[in-house]
Image: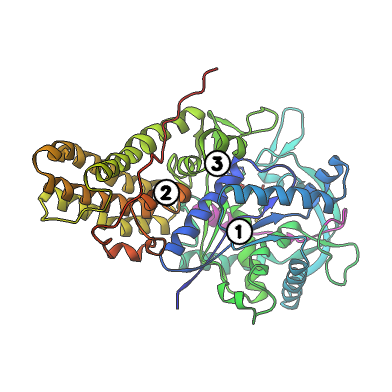
Amino acid sequence: MKPKYYITTPIYYVNGAPHIGHAYTSIAADVMARFKRLDGYDVFFLTGTDEHGQKVEQAAAAAGISPQAFTDKISADFKTMADAMAISYDDYIRTTEDRHKASTTELWKRIEKSGDLYLGHYEGWYAVRDEAFYDESELTKKPDGTFMAPSGAPVEWVREPSYFFKLSAFQDRLLKLYEENPDFIAPTSRRNEVMSFVRGGLLDLSVSRTTFNWGIPVPDAPGHVMYVWLDALNNYVTGCGFPDETASRWKYWPADVHFVGKDIIRFHAVYWPAFLMSAGLPLPKRVTSNGWWVVDGEKMSKSLGNVIEPRKLMETFGLDQIRYFLMREKPFGADGSISHQAIISRMNVELANDLGNLAQRSLSMVARNCGGALPASGPRTDDDTALLSSAAALPDLVRAHMERQTFHDALEEIWKVVRAANGYIDRQAPWALNKTDKVRMAHVLRVLADTVRVVATLLQPVMPGSMAKMLDQLGVPADARDFAALSKPLPDGTPLPAPQGVFPRYVEPAA
Ligand code: MSP
């Protein structure tokens, strides 16, 4: 039986259209999901939308339609977007679905049964944009005298009856969790940040709201709706069929990894495990957080008019090119800058020149000089062995990086082999051998085909469409594209289709 692997994206607020930041977290999670499937895991990959709360209610009101009609529309847009970006989710969850309401009501009841809830009165700061409560010590005062959350969001003073979750009682258990599981929070900088936040002492958390009603009702407490983060976080167990622990999907819980942005680490690494501990449910194994994309060095914002729409990028450059750029350009956990120039440079140097030319040069020689069939291997020179062994070592190197979500390092390892293969082809000069030693030429081309096969197989999670084309051209059957299949050589003489360039150079359209 295949080992299970459960992976999630954050569920996205449906208060506006998807932008590149949303696309990023989803693409990273998708790369991981695809990698695990190819590596022999039974993967369950969940994404979806976060539809309750004041922020969404206000956006619906501004659009002049009911919250449900509004969320139906925007959730559908996020789903279309996920499909357009080849996000291979197994289920798409919406927090307005009945299954989620039932699951979250049950979670609430379990927490209540543990004695971790009490009725009180919340009085303090709230940022609707972050859907978060802040202590005054966390805020900065602006020149106009108003306060601002660390995220830059405006805050307002809230005073209302509320249920509280006894978060303060979980400090020791949370610290023990982080200490015993050093990989629970990644990267380390975020882990340190969370640990010092928890060490600083935790306040009880307001978990119901009474000044609006777009949320899941608190059982037996008229007027109270659940705090949107408790509702939203619980999507991860709803997706596994909770509270039906006999559901076939229940086997996937706990999650192996939650992908989240650095701005929402506190919710996932502090509140979420505390809720689960209280409800007596197993804890996720890892919360990995990505840094932010800024545009030409500046924060993306509607007011600056520099928000990058993933659809436009995909139209201009192509889906796989964008997926590659996002995974390659910056370390996953760090912030990074996105610009057309940077995308074009990755496309033209690494995709078109390095990888595209390598495949095209090798395969067109096979087509022209080997009768369009995969040549047999021959006796190996040191140069052959060096290249083939670096390719053979790749899956393990890449796997180790994937486990840590160091995607850009995984790609760098792959590119080392791509560059080595380009060096090899230049040294071996099969075009010259074609005139002097056709037998050796065929052997050289086979070494190249085998190397490109390893590269293309490992790159499938990042560039699924382009790598499918490349593997077609290499004659790799559809059932021999997982990592285990790499240990079986392709049969000599496999007929190869006519090669076609997979990565054209990007040429700026004439103005
Ligand atoms: N609804 C919550 C998540 C609930 S999960 C139980 C939420 N939604 S969000 O739509 O605002 O953001 C979703 C994700 O997009 C976050 O992980 C956030 O970090 C990410 N990004 C939003 N803007 C971003 C960038 N500019 N760059 C990279 N990712 C950023 O938070």
Magenta region includes residue 191: no
Of callouts 1 and 2, the N-terminal one: 1
Q: Looking at the picture, which amino acid does disc 3 mark? A: Trp
Q: Which residues are magenta?
A: 192-214
How many marks can you see? 3
**Closer to viewer: mark 1 or mark 3:** 3
Of callouts 2 and 3, the N-terminal one: 3
Residue 226 spot, x, y in % from top left: 79, 62
SS class, disc 1: helix
Of residue 311 and residue 96, the one placed in the foreground of this image is 311
Residue located at (44% from left, 59% from top): 35
The picture quadrant where one finds residue 162 is: bottom right
Of residue 98 and residue 486, the one placed in the foreground of this image is 486
Residue located at (55% from left, 57% from top): 88
SS class, disc 2: helix
Mark 2 Cβ inside 8 Å of ligand 1: no
